[in-house]
Amino acid sequence: MTAPFVYLPLPQVSPTLPYNPYYAAPQNTISPFVPPSSRFQASPYLVQPATAASPISSPGDFNPRSVLWPEGAFEAAYTTPSPRLTTFWQGIPVSCLRLPPTPRLSTTAPTQVATVPVPPLDLPPATTAPTQTPSASSAPEQIHPRLAGTAPSSTFFYDLSYSRFLPQRIFHPLPPPHPPQYAMLSSRDFNEPAFHPPRTKLRLLFSRLPFWPVDLALPEAMPEHVNIPISVGDVLVALHHALHARISATDYWTLGETDRRAVRDAFAQRCRAEAVRSGVPPTQLYDVEKREKAQGLRKVDFLCGKTVFTGLVKA
């Protein structure tokens, strides 16, 4: 199991709004943070889902009682927008109401009350304090439960050594001693914002790979008014895409002999495990393992077998 990745919040493209724009802006399931790649064509969040508009409210309505990241059916009920009021009570016209007369107040003091002169006070001129509106930046930053490295989720499993992009959720349909079940995350899980308040720039680092940072940012050609938050899927895909890049001979020979031996062992174990996961007959395991080894070393092999994702922690 790998140690948590370290993330560095970079300056935002535009000032953060006092509300979460994820609930007010139309969402685009095709993320601009990760370049298109044939490796992830099977990922469900790269496909535009067919959604129908709600007859009660528009998709942009914000429910202040909503749950940021629902974990079950009970919390998911609070993510739907509040229904709008469709009928109104017509009250009595204002012109038909007779208001009481406004009392007249005198500004002069009663003659029977003695007044004591008060010496003038030497006060500085009155100033108006600027009104401070609450901003999202003043609130503590929250990270999605599936990405939190301080408290890793027990219902999420993501092995970065798999050549196939396969983050999974863990559920227990039957009580112990029955084993747990695994299922691919849904498109809704991938499209949830990774941070609250949302972020549009991020750098990911790992202690064993400090010379290979992973940066997430909007493309420079993107209009300034577009403020798409980084989603859970953006982080997971960016890590898999970066760690499965091939390395050069220079990268390998910069390591010491002990580290090179550990990398070679991790490479052999990964290729062998990939052949077993392929599901081919035993007589074909050697051929599949040989084809995987022909692809060469990858950055994920520098993790030396500690490839299970355990979350992000802030630097």
Image (tube, rainbow, N blue to C red):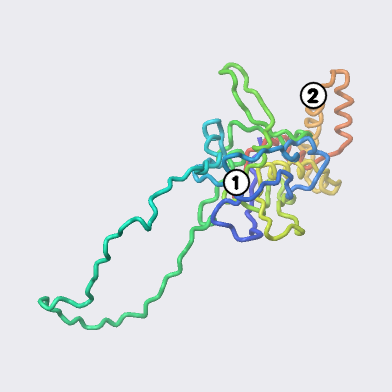
Q: Residue furthest top?
A: 177
Name above or below for residue 141 compared with residue 153.
below
Name above or below for residue 179 compared with residue 80.
above
Count of labels in the image: 2
**Residue 263 visible in the picture:** yes
Residue pictured at 41% horizontal, 72% vertical: 128
| Nearest the eye: 279 or 253 | 279
Side of 44 relative to 22 (left or right): right
Q: What residue type is disc 2 on?
A: Val
Place of residue 30 in the rendered image (x, y in percent of width and height, measured from the top left): 74, 45
Q: What residue type is disc 1 on?
A: Val
What residue sits right under mark 1 in the picture? 313
Place of residue 21 in the rendered image (x, y in percent of width and height, measured from the top left): 60, 51
Q: Which mark is residue 276?
A: 2
Say which quarter of the image contains residue 147.
Answer: top right
Q: Residue furthest front?
A: 96
| Nearest the eye: 127 or 195 | 127
Mark found first going from the N terminus, 2 or 1: 2
- Determine contact: label 2, label 1, CB under 8 Å: no
| Dot 1: element | strand
Residue pictured at 71% horizontal, 43% vertical: 29
Say which quarter of the image contains residue 280.
Answer: top right
Alpha carbon distance from label 2 to label 1: 33 Å
Q: Residue furthest left?
A: 112
